[in-house]
Image (cartoon, coloured by chain):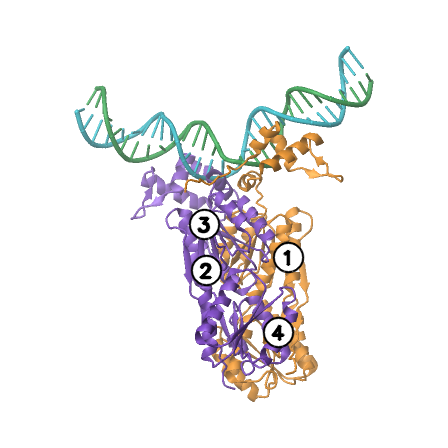
Chain colours: A purple, B orange, C cyan, D green
DNA sequence: AAAATTTTGTAAAACGTTTTAGAAACAAAA
DNA sequence: TTTTGTTTCTAAAACGTTTTACAAAATTTT
């Protein structure tokens, strides 16, 4: 198949230097040299020796020892990515895309999941810091401002996405326009002829969810239709959901908005359990859900983060900050809509 | 503005040594010492100095520099995990669990996705090798035996899961009993009163899929019911699926098995498009699908990898191999069934 | 009290790289 | 020729650990 040379485990820069008959330093210079417009090596070696060195390195199967480089330079060419749960499809997609971008830029990516618990977040930040990442892309938990500060103290760049940390300065942000997402949810339901809109959420101070609710409320007010929201205790949400939905329908609510992933799952389960038909009994807009419409043929709509965009903006911004060009800013992106549809049967 | 951030200079082992009034070596010995039954430090330092050193290290906020340790010892306390797509829920869950186990064991995990393309797989193995991982857990693509050999050449342990690489020796395996999974799929459908079972797959030599089909065929033969299988070209599967399912039904097929994730997605889409009712027109068993039954209330069944078990066996086996105790073996696990159910409406 | 042994500690050499400061070698200018 | 500049290359000092091979001190044995 491929006639590549067998990579022997320990070819060092010294071996290359000896084989090429030059000093270690020169090998290092050449191997780290930037290339000129016509491919020439921009370093203090003559083109002839430079080429000989590169060729020798290749022939011997030399690969830079990352630990040594990292020790010497303080760089690791690694970025750390922290999310609440990488097995959540939305985060999985974002991580996947970041990984690809990072790879193409010569970076290694390490991922970790927090379960949305700040103690875990803190621990992971420490772990990543001590393993020497060059920068962070994180979906923060609430109350992790101190961890972010710790990163910034080390002069490492941070980009956050998915959820804001209001008041924190010196970081990059890639965030959904959540109020807009809320307004859109209401408009979608209005477009389906709905006249009384409900929203269920758990008790929280997560800005994302609060903003979505605000957007919904504002838009409903603007349209002059009734808007009812219910707030459940986080622990008992699953249980309480059934009675809340039951009552809402009794009160004439004909459309529900579930403003986060977890709420959407519980909400749809409850609707299933109640035997409500979607959308005949209740129209639905869910958030942060994977699009499975083609398989499951649902009649409800989703509002999502455009995962590809989030990944691209986040990584670009971080890379800029690491390299020194480019700066950390706040990027507000538009939500992605998947409108419910049912294929005629 | 005028407040310059306090960059805490990294505190090294030397700082600890000075602060504690001992030599660098002693600090290293103490900090790497194993603990005796009553918590004493098993090294050539007296308990008193050992405690003083540990306390000093903590007070100064010392953290081992990983690059230096890695350079010196050749260990990195990092494992590499390669899957085809981390945004696939099944793989996401496995990765998540591996990450947790690895963290608890003091290891860092780096993940990467191949898109099931062997060139990518090779590249990632190289990348992980050169960044010095201590071991691999991978869901291999077909035809990557050479990459595995490369790892083994470096004396690093490998555990594969999800898909077998027949004939490769010296590696650990955590695999589903795919024939059994196939047999179970048929039995599930039999239990629902089905009398003519069909299966669609794309053209492939992936052992996983072949084994599942064999299991189905065997069980159907054993039960004495007709079994029809269709093999589509990979590229046009999505398109062809509709006509295949249409014809199958004409021929009296009353139950379909889709023996992999991608096939299941395309199959269900086609069924949606055809407007077939599940299970009235066609009963279905899908493979490798996320369980969304509570939300979507489907009337079909899944056969899945038990993600938690796969992760646990894989990591345990790898850790054993890294540490030197424990050995690489082949572990065959039972598939996980999610039986279709519809809540009365 | 001397010798032997054990306990407690240290100096110094790696590990493989980058990078500073400067040395040769060579060419151009005086 | 000498001087001055380039171009091309090198020696050696880090980076922060671990670990080998001893040294010094304390303790026990003779």
> Is label 3 in contact with label 4 (beta carbons under 8 Å)?
no
Judging depth in this view, the residue of B56 and A224 nearest the camera is A224
Give x and y (percent) for residue B216.
Answer: 64, 76
How far apart, in angstroms, are the residues tagged by discs 3 and 2?
A: 15 Å
Q: Is residue A19 above or below residue A186?
A: above
Please report, as a chain letter, where disc 2 is located.
A
Question: Closer to us: mark 3 or mark 2?
Answer: 3
Q: Which residue is labeled 3 in the image? A: A169
In the rendered image, residue B303, in percent from the top left (x then y), is placed at: 63, 71
Give the vertical position of B261 relative to B68 (above or below).
below
Label 1 with label 3: CB-CB less than 8 Å? no
Give the mark toward the camera: 1 or 3.
3
Q: Which residue is mark 4?
A: A244
Mark 3–mark 2 contact, CB under 8 Å? no
Label 1, label 2: how far apart the Cα atoms are? 37 Å
- Residue under label 1: B314
Residue A25, by quadrant, is: top left
Look at mark 2 in the image and give the residue it sits on: A175
Local crowd size for mark 1, using a 10 Å CA cut-off: few (<14), some (14–19), many (≥20): many
């Amino acid at each position: 198949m491929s006639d590549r040379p067998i990579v022997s485990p320990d070819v060092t820069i010294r071996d290359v230097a000896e084989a090429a008959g030059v000093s270690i330093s020169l090998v290092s210079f050449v191997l780290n040299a930037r290339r000129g417009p016509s491919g020439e090596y921009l370093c203090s070696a003559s083109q002839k020796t430079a080429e000989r060195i590169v060729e020798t390195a290749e022939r011997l199967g030399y690969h830079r020892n990352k630990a040594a480089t990292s020790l010497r330079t303080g760089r690791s060419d690694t970025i750390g990515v922290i999310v609440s749960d990488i097995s959540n499809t939305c985060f999985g997609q974002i991580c996947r895309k970041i990984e690809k971008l990072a790879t193409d830029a010569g970076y290694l990516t390490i991922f970790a999941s927090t379960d949305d618990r700040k103690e875990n977040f803190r621990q992971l930040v420490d772990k990543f810091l001590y393993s020497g990442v060059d920068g962070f892309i994180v979906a923060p938990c609430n109350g992790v401002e101190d961890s972010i500060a710790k990163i910034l103290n080390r002069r490492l760049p941070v980009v956050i996405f998915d959820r804001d940390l209001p008041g924190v300065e010196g970081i990059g942000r890639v965030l959904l326009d959540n109020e807009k997402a809320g307004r859109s949810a209401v408009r979608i339901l209005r477009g389906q002829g709905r006249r009384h809109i409900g929203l269920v959420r758990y008790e929280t101070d997560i800005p994302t969810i609060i903003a979505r609710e605000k957007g919904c409320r504002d838009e409903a007010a603007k349209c002059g239709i009734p808007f009812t929201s219910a707030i459940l205790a986080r622990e008992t949400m699953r249980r309480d959901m059934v009675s809340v939905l039951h009552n809402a329908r009794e009160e004439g609510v004909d459309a529900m908005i579930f403003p986060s992933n977890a709420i959407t799952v519980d909400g749809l389960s409850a609707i299933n359990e109640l035997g409500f038909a979607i959308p005949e009994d209740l129209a639905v807009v869910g958030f942060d859900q994977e699009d499975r419409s083609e398989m499951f043929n649902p009649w409800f709509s989703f509002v999502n983060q455009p995962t590809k965009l989030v990944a691209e903006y986040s990584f670009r911004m971080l890379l800029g900050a690491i390299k020194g060009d480019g700066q950390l800013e706040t990027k507000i992106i538009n939500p992605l809509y998947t409108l419910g549809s049912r294929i005629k049967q």
